């Protein structure tokens, strides 16, 4: 499948027989290790004596492979039931994955005209639910911390302001009594 046809995909369920070509994995290191492996079928594996015109679908991960080696241990790479992808949407990471793909193109003499990146998973709906739950938990925590800090600041302001007012009132009363 041409990557340009899936540019707007968020989750993709691949056909029976789709798998990762881990023997064509590549990485790019820039502090973190950005790992990529093409998503293909038996027909697209060079070890089977064939190549695709363009390898546009790539499974990705960060710090789940060894730099300079063809091992790919990202996502559910070892799950035989995994045949789905959850789209990688981080704009900060995408250029690094693209650099890893360019290295794979040079190393394996392949083309990737419109590479798009997916996290390799068995159940993308479950993964989206986990992402949402984590995000919601972080939102609740951030709001709780914000509320707590505001309450602390208000209490400090009231105590400070109230003590200065009392001190001024005491001086004023002493001046009137004299």
Image (cartoon, helix red, strand yellow):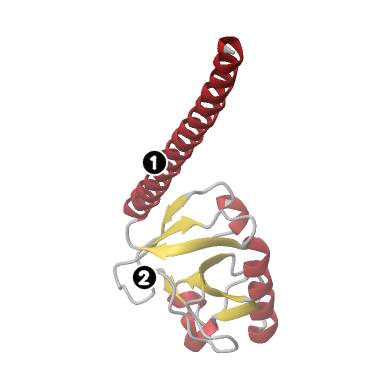
Residue at x-position 44% and y-position 54%: 12
Residue at x-position 34% and y-position 52%: 130
Decide: few, some or many residues near mark 2? Use Cα within 10 Å; few <14, some 14-19, many ≥20. some
Residue at x-position 58% and y-position 55%: 90
Rendering coords of residue 147 (x, y %): 44, 35
Query: Residue 140: which disc?
Result: 1
Nearer to me, 118 or 52:
118
Residue at image mark 2 = 76
Is residue 49 visible to us here?
Answer: no
Nearer to me, 153 or 164:
164
Q: Earlier in the sequence, mark 2 or mark 1?
A: 2
Q: Residue furthest left?
A: 81
**Which element type, helix, strand or loop, lies under badge 1?**
helix
Asked if residue 58 is positioned above or below residue 49 in the image, the reply reads above
**Which element type, helix, strand or loop, lies under badge 2?**
loop
Rendering coords of residue 118 (x, y %): 50, 61
Q: Residue furthest front?
A: 178
Asked if residue 45 is positioned above or below residue 166 in the image, the reply reads below
Quadrant housing the N terminus: bottom right
Q: Nearer the viewer, mark 2 or mark 1?
A: 1
Q: Quadrant of residue 164?
A: top right
Task: Kindly report the distance in space between the C-alpha atoms of the residues bearing marks 2 and 1.
Answer: 29 Å
Rendering coords of residue 58 (x, y %): 54, 67
Rendering coords of residue 14 (x, y %): 41, 60
Nearer to me, 86 or 47:
86
Query: Residue 39: which disc?
Result: none
Asked if residue 60 is positioned above or below residue 155 in the image, the reply reads below
Q: Residue furthest top?
A: 176
């Amino acid at each position: 499948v041409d990557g340009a046809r899936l540019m707007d995909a968020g989750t993709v369920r691949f056909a029976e027989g789709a798998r990762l070509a881990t023997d064509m994995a590549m990485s790019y290191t820039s502090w973190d290790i950005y790992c990529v492996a093409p998503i293909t079928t038996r027909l697209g594996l060079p070890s089977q004596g064939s190549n695709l015109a363009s390898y546009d679908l790539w499974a990705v991960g960060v710090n789940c492979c060894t730099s300079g080696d063809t091992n790919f241990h990202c996502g559910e790479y070892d799950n035989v039931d995994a045949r789905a992808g959850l789209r990688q949407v981080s704009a900060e990471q995408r250029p690094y994955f693209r650099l890893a793909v360019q290295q794979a193109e040079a190393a394996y003499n392949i083309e990737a005209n419109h590479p798009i990146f997916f996290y390799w998973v068995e159940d993308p709906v479950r993964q989206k639910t986990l992402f949402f739950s984590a995000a919601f938990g972080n939102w609740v925590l951030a709001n709780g911390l914000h509320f707590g800090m505001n309450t602390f600041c208000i209490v400090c302001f009231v105590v400070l302001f109230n003590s200065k007012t009392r001190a001024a009132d005491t001086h004023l009363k002493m001046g009137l009594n004299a």
